[in-house]
Amino acid sequence: MKKLVSAAATAAFSALIGAGALPAGAQTLNLAVGAPVTSLDPHYHALSPNYAVADMLFDSLTAFDARARVQPRLAESWKPVGENVWEFKLRPNVTFHNGNAFTAEDVAFTIARVPTVPNSPSSYGIYTRAIQRVEVVDPLTVRFHTNGAYPLLPVDLGQIQMLDSETHANPLTEEFNSGKLAIGTGPFRMVSYRSGDRIEYVRNDAYFGDKPHWQRVNYRMITNDAARTAALLSGDVDFIDQVPTSDITKLRGDQRVQLSEADGLRLIFLALDHAHEGNSPLITDNDGKPLGHNPLRDVRVRRALSMAIDRQAITDRVMEGASLPSAQLLPPTAFGALPDRQAGRPDPEGARRLLAAAGYPQGFRIQLNGPNDRYMNDARIIQAIGQMWTRIGVRTAVEGQPWATFVGRAGRQELSAMLVGWGTSSGEPTSPLRSLLATVTPARGWGGSNRGRYSNPAMDAKLDEGLRTLDDAKREALLREATTIAMDDVGIIPIHIQKNIWAMRRGLQHEARADELTRAQDIRPAP
């Protein structure tokens, strides 16, 4: 049994959180992000904004640095001690915000909890499925028994925030959002959370790692691009992410602010309806009547839709240079990427020929959906693609919606074509392959964000083999094969890789991250 925090310490902690008390003259960081947070439960919804705020409250066993390389965090070291066993040594003297000690018991508890979170829109269970059993060797040693060789375990565990087996026994997602259970080992503690508006943090002075500079953080959600930039220029906030592309040139020339930039790992892509054999929800013939079948299940149609898209024009005119046109899942220099696969030029005539060969010489009607408050220029991107599809005879209506509404419809397979994104924080392809393209298999944690329900057994087989291959070179070759199968089959339609751009007032410095996470601990006063 773990030792609980004393009553006096509990009272002091409760007073701090309840009153938001801070020393006089405390340094405060006001930052604004462009994407809404959907939950403070670190295992509820695998979404970059959620992970960013959770990374301020909680810690994982491993972590990723700014270049997406795996680093120690709550685990000091790890090694395989058998073909299917990994041993992790935990950092000593780590405590949760309420004073409870972090031990191997908490690791076992957390791994068991992750796949059981009810109603998860995008489960973190994909990162724990390889673990068959967790063995608590002693309070600071834990062994993970996997289903065969599994080289990616240190990578996967970088996505799983650790909970306290006592504090979080039988937790409800709502209790994290209320603050009752927003208790981790992270560099900040939560003071308050107003959904869709802001989160207030105070520094955790008992943190085991580098102490953040800021004693208080106001983490605001300003999804309107113009309002976010205006808040920075007016001094209402000190730092913003998702700098609107239309403001980049203006901000570069403003002596009051400076930019922080990094090549990103977020793919913006189109998911297509592979689920419906009969009528797809938002596809009709040119007279508005049901087709009786789903044209998106024909690879020729999918290729035609991809060939119609002028990715370079989207990068130049919509993204104003803040993206890299892409025909695959990752930047070409990433581990497992396809170095010779280029986005290429659009081919409208070739697209029309493919449509005719598939039996649609006059095209058909489709609705393209997407969020209008989640990704950089998301509403403008779907408008541009809609025009490109219409030019090849696929008459396209476009609908943008707030993320919360859109993602619910997408998850229920109510859409035919949709714009979504995926940030690969691990910097390698198993994350998008498992989540976006693998056949939906809850028992394995596969396909958690496969909203189009794409399925290709040949791709699944290569992915599965790659996940069990310890040799890096052989694993990379297998993952490239899996990616090639999915891309040739147009399981999804890649559009571009986002560049990550932040802006801040002069006098601050920021470590730009490839995974695009916006965290207060990465911001400090300039020396």
Image: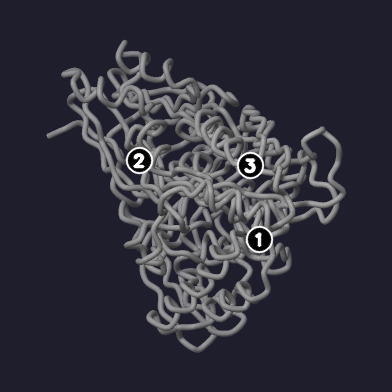
Label 1 and label 3: CA atoms lie apart by 17 Å
Contact? badges 2 and 1 (CB < 8 Å):
no
Horizontal relation, residue 441 to residue 473: left or right: right
Q: Secondary structure at mark 1?
A: helix
Q: Amino acid at mark 1?
A: Val
| Crowdedness near tag 3: few (<14), some (14–19) or many (≥20) residues, C-alpha within 10 Å | many
Label 2 and label 1: CA atoms lie apart by 33 Å
Quadrant containing the N terminus is bottom right
- Foreground tag (2 vs 3): 3
Residue shown at the point (45%, 45%) measured from the top left: 55
Label 2 and label 3: CA atoms lie apart by 22 Å
Contact? badges 1 and 3 (CB < 8 Å):
no
Q: Amino acid at mark 3?
A: Met
Q: Secondary structure at mark 2?
A: strand
Above or below residue 373? Residue 327 is below
Residue shown at the point (60%, 72%) measured from the top left: 459
Q: Can residue 216 be seen at all in this image of the molecule?
A: no
For marks 2 and 1 on the same chain, the one whose residue lies earlier in the sequence: 1
Q: Nearer the viewer, residue 444 or 181?
A: 444
Q: Which residue is mark 1?
A: 299
Q: Which residue is mark 3?
A: 418
Residue shown at the point (65%, 35%) measured from the top left: 369
Horizontal relation, residue 83 to residue 217: left or right: right
- Location of residue 285 (image quadrant): top right
Q: Which residue is mark 2?
A: 500
| Crowdedness near tag 1: few (<14), some (14–19) or many (≥20) residues, C-alpha within 10 Å | some
Q: Nearer the viewer, residue 444 or 201?
A: 444
Residue shown at the point (53%, 33%) measured from the top left: 374
For marks 1 and 3 on the same chain, the one whose residue lies earlier in the sequence: 1
For marks 2 and 3 on the same chain, the one whose residue lies earlier in the sequence: 3
Residue 356 location (% of width, % of height): 68, 53
